[in-house]
Amino acid sequence: MMAAGRMLAPAMCSRASTAARPRVAVRLMGATAAAHPSHRTRSLAFRASQNVSATTIRRGNLAPAHLTHTSRSLCVVAAEGGGKGKGKGKKEDNVYGHTVLLPKTDFEMRANSVTKEPAIQQWWADNKIYEQIAERADAEMFTLHDGPPYANGDLHIGHALNKILKDFVNRYQMMKGKRVRYVPGWDCHGLPIELKVLQSIDADARKALTPIKLRKKARAFALKTVDKQRDAFRRYGVWGDWEDPYLTLLPEYEAAQMEVFGQMFLNGHVYRGKKPVHWSPSSMTALAEAELEYPEGHVSQSVYVAFPLVSGSIPAGFPAEHASVLEAGASLAVWTTTPWTMPANAAVAVNDKLDYSFVEVTGTAGDSEKESSRMVGKTLVVAQGLVAEVAKTWGLTLETVCTVPGSALVGFEYTHPMYGRASPVVAGGDYITTDSGTGLVHTAPGHGQEDYATGLKFGLPLLSPVDDKGLFTEEAGDGLVGKSVLKDGNEACIEKLRQSDALILQEPYNHKYPYDWRTKKPTIFRATEQWFASVEGFREEALAELDKIEFVPASGAKRMRPMVSGRNDWCISRQRSWGVPIPCFYDKETKEPLMDKATIEHVTEIVRTKGTDAWWELELVDLLPDQYKDKADSLVRGTDTMDVWFDSGSSWAGVVKSRGLKYPADMYLEGSDQHRGWFQSSLLTGVAAAGNAPYEKILTHGFVLDEKGYKMSKSLGNVIDPRLIIEGGKNQKTEPAFGADTLRLWVASTDYTSDVLIGMNILKQTSDAYRKLRGTLRFLMGNVGDFDPAADAVPYDQLPSFDRYALRRTADMLAEMDRAYETHQYSQVTAQLQSFTAFLSNVYLDASKDRLYAESPTGVSRRCAQTVVNEIVTRLLCVVAPIAPHMAEEAFTALPYKPGHESVFLRGWVDAAPEWTAGMDDVEAGFWATALAIRGEVNRAIETGRNEKILGASLEAKAVIYASDAALAASVASREEELKQAFIVSQIQFVSSVDDVTGACGGQCVSEITAAQAKLDGISIGDGADAIVKVGVCKADGAKCARCWGYFGDLGSDERHPELCPRCTTIVIEKDPELRVPAKKAEEVTA
C-alpha cells in the first residue's frame, strides 16, 4: 500500500512549462455523484500557485496547504490555458486521471459568510430547529437565564462576548440531548432610557412632560432599541425565543415583580425610613452601589478643623490630674474631605480604645505664612499615633501636654464654629483608626453610613440641609442657601470656617469618589425618605445560599461573598417616573403610608392587565381595594419607582418561574461587574421572597480591550463594532467581512475569565484558524464523497492497527472536548481542535492519501480509511457545532448520505464507540506513539536529503532504521507494510547497528532519537540511558510507478501499462480495459 503523495502525473505535468501559469480546473463532483443523483455537481476553479508545477493543488484547493506534506503536492485532473496566458490552450489528456479517486464534496472551501450565514439562520427558522429542541418531550431541562442588557443604545463587542458565551453553553447542552429554552431579555426601565428620551427633546418640551407622557416616550424608545439589538444578537448566531423575549416593561413581568416586592414586604424585609443614601444631584435620584463608578483623578478639598471644647463640660471619666489642660481652652482637631457636610455636624466621634494627646502648638516649622500658623498658641486634641504626622502636614511644631484614653473624652461637648451649637463627643467604633486624619471623626448622621449608625446609637439629630438638586436649603443658614454642595457651597463652608478661625488647614486630596455611572458626575450621601430592603433580616440565609453556588471561575465566590456579608440595607426606591411604582398610598396630612397585602394584591392585578401606566392613568379610587375606597379623598398615590436592579433582580419570578423553566436556573452568566449587580440583586430578592437563590451556577467573564490592552472608547477611536466584524465595512480590504463564526471562534479562543483583547491582527489570526478548520472538514468530507456508512463501513475489529489508533486518538479528543465544554473552558476546545486537526493533517490524512486516492473504489483498504474518516467527520461536527454552528450545519447538510436527522443539533453529540478505547490498549497505542516519533525523524532525514539534492519527494526514499531495543526492533520490523504507509516512503530496511544506518545512507541523511529525548516526548524506545533509534534515508530501489509514484522492482506486469506497479495495473485495467499507455508516453507522464 503506497502513499499517493505524488500521483496522477498528467501529460502536462512538466516542470519545464512554467513560463505561463495556466488556470487549473479541479472538478469536484457532487458528494455522491452516481449513488446519490439528488446532489448537484459542482465545478470550482482555482488559480495555480506560482511556486509549484502548474498542475499542482496548493492553498485554496481541496487539499489545503496545512494538509499537504512538503513532498506531497497532488497533481490534478487537467490543465487549461498555456502559451503566453492569452486564451485557452489545447486541452491535454490526463492518461490516468480518470482512474484516480479525487475528493468530492458539496461543502465549499469559501465560507461566503455574508450570504451563507443569514441563509442558514433562515433555514433554521423555517425548519424550526430551535423550537424542536426547546420542545423536546421527556428530556432533561436546562435553563441558562439571561441577564437583561439595557435597551438604550447600540451593541458593542462586550455584548457579543456575553451573548456568544451563553450560546456556547446552550448549544452544547442541546447537543447533549437536553431540552433547552433560552429566553433573552431586556431591561427597559430606569434612568438610562429616561435620559435618552430627555436628551432627544428641547427644554420647553421637557417642561411640558407629564409622567405619563414621559413613560410613553420611554416605552417607545425602549421597544425600538429592543428590535434593533435583537436583530444584531440573532446575526451572531445566538438561538433563543427571539419572537417572545422578556421585557421588564411587559405587564406580566411588572406584575411578577410587584409580587416579589409584596412578598418581601409581607415577610418584613421592606421598610420606609429616612437615612443617608447615595444621591445623584445630576439625576435627582437615589442610587444603588452598583450604579456607581469610581474614576481615577478625583480631587477633593480636604480641611482640618478645630472644634472648641465647651468649658465646664468635663466628663467624670476625664483624669483629674490633667484638668488644668482645659483651663486655657482646647479644641478637637477633625479632618474631612467633604467640608459641605459641616452644617450637618452633630458629634465628634473617637475610638475609645485609642489614646489621644493634648498638644500645644508652639510654633511653625518652616513657612510662617502658612494658613495653619493661626493655631500657634492653641491646644489641640489628636490621636497620639498621629501627632508626628499632623505636625508635618500642618507645618507646625507640637508639644504634647498630656495623653488620655479615648474613653476619657467621651462626654465632652464642643461648640460648632459655624453655628455656635453645642454637640457631644461620642464613642464611635473600629472605623476610627490612625491610618489618616486626626483620629477624631466629624460625624454628620445625615451624610454618611457609619455616621448614621453612630447617630442611631446615641440619638443624634439627622441633619441634611440639602435638596434633590444638591443645593443647600434654608436649614443650612445664611450665606449657603441655594449654593451647590459640590461647587460654590463647598467653598462657602470652607470660607465660613476660615472666618471663624476654626480652619487649621485646607489642602487638595486625591482619592476615589463615587460618581453616577450614567451622568458621569459626582454623587453625595444624603438622608432622604426612601424604601429599603433590610438585608440584615436575611443576610445569613443569603450567605448560606451563596455557599451552595458553583462559581466559574472559582474566585468569583471570594469576590461576591464579602459584598453580601458587608451589605447595608438596600435602597430600592427611586425618584423617577419611568419604572415600576412602589404601590404605596400616603395620608395627605400625616404622610403616613398605607400599604398592606390587600393594596399590593389589588394593584398587582391591575398591573397584570393594564401595565404600570395604570398607576398614573387611573383615578386613585380605582387603585384602592374595596375596603379602602372610602379613604380615597384623604390619600395620595406614591411617586417612587423601584430600583432597576430590583426590576432585573426579580426576573427569576417574571421569567424562570412564570414561563415554566427550570427553577432554580442552572446558570446565570454575565460580566464580573455583576457580582455587585444582577447576581446580588437576584440573590437578595430570591432569598427574601422565595427562600432560596435563583441559580445554581454563576459564570463571569471579563471586559473587552483593544489589542494593545486599552479600554475601548470613542475618543481613542478603538471601538470595534461586532456588526462590522461580521459584515465588513465599505472597504473590504481594510475592513473585511469575517462572519459570525469567526467572531464566535475568537470568543472561544479567549480566556474570558479575565479581560480579553481584540483587534484587526487578532481577528486575522482567528480567521486563518477558521479557514484551516474549514479546510480540514472539507478535505475529510471530500474523501467520503462516495461512502455510505450503512453499506460501506468496515467493522472495527477488521480495521488495521493504524486506523484503530486514529480512532483511539479521536476518542481521547472527544473526551477532552466533553470535559472542556462541561467546565466551560472554551479555549481548551479550540486548543484541542488545533491539536487534533494537526494530527489529522500531518499524520493520519497524509498517510492515508494513497489508500483514499489510488486504491480501488470499493477496496477494503480504502473502505477502512473512509470508515475512519467518516467517524472523525461525525465527531468533529459535534465538537465544532456549539462554537461555529453555521459551518457545522453547512457541513452536516453536505454529507453525501442521509445522516438520519435534519440538523446537526437534532442529531446531537455522538460519543466515541467504547471499543475505540477498549479495543486498543495502552501498549498498542504506545507503539504508535513511538512509531510516529520515528516517522518524525525519517521526515527530518528526508528534508536533509531534499536540501542536499539527493531526494525529491518522500516516495523516492527508502528508510533505514535501527532500534537498539530488541523488542522495539522486532515490533517495527513486523509491521513493515503499515509503517511504509505511515512514513510515506517506498521501502523500509531494518538493520542491526548504527553503522549499518550510516553505511546505507551516508553521514548526511540521518537522524536519531536518544533515550533522553524519548523521555521528554513521553515515548519508550527501550530501557537504559543508552537506548537509541537511528534512522536514515537513501534512494529507493526500483523504478517509479507512473500512477502512484511509489518505487517498485516489478513494474510492467501487463504490457498495456509498462510503467505501472502491479496494484495500479489491476485497478487501471478494471477501470478502463481499453486504455494502453506505451512506455514512451508513460515516461512523458512521469517527467
Image (tube, helix red, strand yellow):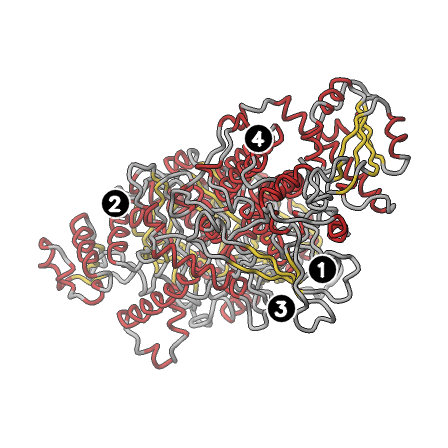
- For marks 1 and 4 on the same chain, the one whose residue lies earlier in the sequence: 1
Q: What amino acid is at disc 1? A: Ala
Q: What amino acid is at disc 2? A: Gln
Q: Which mark is residue 734?
A: 3
Which mark lies nearer to you, 1 or 2? 1
Compared to 360, does 367 lie above or below? below
* Residue 427 visible in this rendered orientation of the protein: no
Which mark lies nearer to you, 3 or 2? 3
Residue annotated with mark 1: 54
Q: What amino acid is at disc 3? A: Thr
Q: Which mark is residue 808?
A: 4
**Image-based side of 880 in relation to 67, left or right:** left
The crowd level at tag 1 (other Cα within 10 Å; few <14, some 14-19, many 20+) is many
Element class at badge 4: helix
Coordinates of residue 358 in the picture (x, y in percent): 61, 47
Q: Going 52% across and 66% down the picture, which residue do you hit?
A: 490
